[in-house]
Image (spheres, coloured by chain):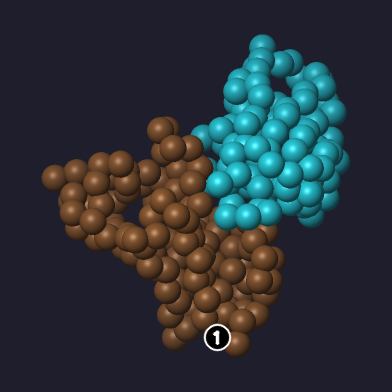
């Protein structure tokens, strides 16, 4: 099974900050990676697929990059509605998810 | 825009079968591009993909190794829905269960839309 390791597990940031979250796969997965945002009591919501493709309707301040084993999600200017938990998911093989990164208000 | 609506009990007794249903609007369970997934989330296990079913001239299903001996996912074309059945549950199966759709064809893909989630507690 492919393991995904996210870092950090949590971070504190201010509105307007640039935030970067990383996701490392235990083996190469090409660009078969998605990013989701989850708010309390809600299901995850798709942000990025194929490592860098922005899902329709998602603000352009979100971006993804990477291939192989190392991936990043970047929020260029953090907005109040972005405080949430973010997950990566690989679909190169049986789907699996990272442990999550909680973005909190500083 | 596809939407998924989950239903089913929130409390299941140990050793019994957990059964949840996901109703589909805006697409067909027999779509030749969609795959219908179940995923669960718990503090101890995080997000865990359980399996999926899809139709490509015939029905296919794929399951996670961790639950393969206990799980069945099947589709009901007359009601345009799909269901999860997990047998012999234990307290370890306590989680929030989600249904979700991907459009990867035969391949796994990103989960495009999710159901609202159902909290299932396994307890006597």
| Chain at tag 1 | B
- The answer to which quarter of the image holds residue A84 is top right
In the figure, the shade used to draw chain A is cyan
Q: Along the horizontal axis of the image, is B4 left or right of A25?
A: left
Q: Along the horizontal axis of the image, is B102 left or right of B67?
A: right
Q: Position of residue B12 (x, y in %)?
A: 22, 52
In the figure, the shade used to draw chain B is brown
The residue indicated by pointer 1 is B58
Q: Position of residue A70 (x, y in %)?
A: 77, 35
Residue at image point 27% right, 60% down: B87
Q: Position of residue A37 (x, y in %)?
A: 64, 39
Q: Along the horizontal axis of the image, is A58 left or right of B118?
A: right
Check the picture and name the quadrant holding the C terminus of chain A.
top right
Q: Position of residue A46 (x, y in %)?
A: 68, 49
Does residue A100 sit above or below B19 in this rendering? above
Q: Along the horizontal axis of the image, is A31 left or right of B100?
A: right
Residue at image point 43% right, 61% down: B6
Disc 1 is placed on an element classified as loop
């Amino acid at each position: 099974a492919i393991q995904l390791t996210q870092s950090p597990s949590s971070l504190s940031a201010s509105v307007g900050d640039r935030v970067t979250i990383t996701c490392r796969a235990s083996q190469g997965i090409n660009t078969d990676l998605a990013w989701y945002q989850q708010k309390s009591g809600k299901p995850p919501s798709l942000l990025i697929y194929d490592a860098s493709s922005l899902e329709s309707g998602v603000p352009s301040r979100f971006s993804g990059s990477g291939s192989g084993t190392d991936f990043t999600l970047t929020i260029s200017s953090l907005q109040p509605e972005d405080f949430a938990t973010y997950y990566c998911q690989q679909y190169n093989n049986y789907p699996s998810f990272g442990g999550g990164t909680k973005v909190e208000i500083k | 825009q596809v939407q998924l609506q989950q239903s089913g009990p929130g409390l299941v007794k140990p050793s019994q079968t957990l059964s949840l249903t996901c109703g589909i609007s805006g697409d067909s369970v027999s779509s030749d591009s969609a795959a219908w997934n179940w995923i669960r989330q718990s503090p101890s296990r995080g997000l865990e993909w359980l399996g999926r079913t899809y139709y490509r001239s015939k029905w296919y299903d794929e399951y996670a190794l961790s639950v393969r001996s206990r799980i069945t996912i099947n589709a009901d074309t007359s009601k345009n829905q799909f269901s999860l059945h997990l047998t012999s549950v234990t307290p370890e199966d306590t989680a929030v269960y989600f249904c979700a759709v991907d459009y990867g064809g035969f391949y796994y893909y990103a989960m495009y839309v999710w159901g609202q989630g159902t909290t299932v507690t396994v307890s006597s």
